[in-house]
Amino acid sequence: MLNFLTEAILAFDSVYLAAHTFSTLSSRYPLLSEPADSYCRTATRPPKPYKFGSQVLHHVKNTGLHGLTGDLQRINPAKKGNFSLRINLLGYSGNIDDIGFWEPVTDVHVNMTGDSKAQLQKNVQVSDELKPHFRVTTIMERPYVMLKNNHYELDQNAQFEGFCIDLLAELSRDLGFTYTIHQVKDRNYGNDLGNGTWDGMIGEILRGEAEMAVAPLTVNFKRAEVVDFTKPFLSLGISILYKIPPDNQPDLFSFLNPLSLEIWICIVIAIGKACSAPPEERKKKDEKF
């Protein structure tokens, strides 16, 4: 509910700022008569920008307007975002404690007092019947998610092991929730099928078949448009490792390094045979050439 309320407030302020900008500048510029003369880049023509675009952008950046969320000068690069969201802890007893805030630049700041930590611990220690329950989808990939050797003898959650399973267990103990793990039906991670539908774990979340996916799932732009990701627990990159050669100074015979010892021996033998041949044979060879 809080998430939807925040989005509604931000949407209201956006429309409010746009309407105020249009109302203020319409008395000085013919805003409605110029958009038809603007167009985007195409294969046959270059783009033509909106004639009064710079005036509109300047007004938005320098407006003194205040909305439901406060000062609306948010896209000014010099200010780097001047709003924050408070983080409140709601306990099962109904107590609400302000434990931190979020800012666009510096991200999350949490500073829980002793009472807040005690409240959070109470939340974790309540009975499983009162804890929120999540259906968790996952995919088999060693060493993150694996089936135990005797998985057919175990209960549903106990069948799985691996890094992601241990991480999920720690989160459930810290945050106070229960879960049921199942393997994704089509054995896929999640791909956009092109018609607004997804397969794999992403598809199960969007269809409501699971509330959470815990797996080695790569974060990309298209997936982030339809689901929310936590911060990655593993970052991969392309790297090349090589041994640094020792810093040896070249010696007197380093010029012999390009060829192996065997080749140098053959060269010396060939030269020796040529030099030891009788003068008559060497003369005949010279005449042939």
Image (tube, rainbow, N blue to C red):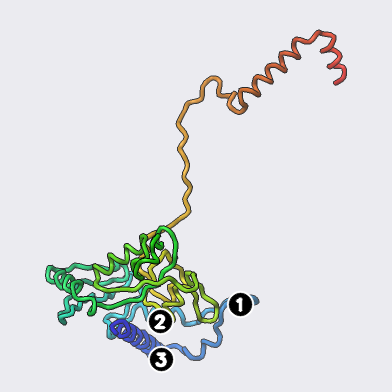
Question: Amino acid under label 1?
Answer: Thr
Q: Residue furthest left?
A: 115
Foreground of the two, 216 or 258 = 216
Please provide percent x and percent y for residue 276.
75, 9
Quarter in which the C terminus is drawn: top right
Q: Which disc is residue 42 wearing?
A: 1
Q: Nearer the viewer, mark 2 or mark 3?
A: 2
Secondary structure under badge 3?
A: loop
Helix, strand or loop under label 2: loop
Badge 1 element = loop
Q: Are marks 2 and 3 in contact (CB under 8 Å)?
A: no
Splitting the image into 4 quarters, where does residue 91 fall?
bottom left
Q: CA distance from mark 1 to mark 3?
A: 33 Å
Residue at 32% across, 78% down: 73
Q: Quadrant of residue 92?
A: bottom left
Whole-percent x and y of residue 213?
A: 39, 71
Image: 134 above or below 28: above
Residue 29 figure quarter = bottom left
For image coordinates 46% across by 77% down, the residue present is: 203
Question: Could you tell which of marks 2 and 3 lies nearer the N-terminus?
Answer: 3
Answer few, some or many: residues within 10 Å of disc 1's Cα (few below 14, many 20 plus, some between 14 and 19).
few
Question: Mark 1 and mark 2 in contact (Cβ < 8 Å)?
Answer: no
Residue marked by disc 2 = 208
Q: Nearer the viewer, residue 59 or 44?
A: 44
- Label 2 or label 1, whichever comes before in sequence order: 1
Real-space Cα distance between discs 2 and 3? 50 Å
Q: Residue furthest front?
A: 153
Residue pointed to by mark 3: 27
Whether residue 150 is visible: yes
Q: CA distance from mark 2 to mark 1?
A: 41 Å
Dot in front, 2 or 1: 2
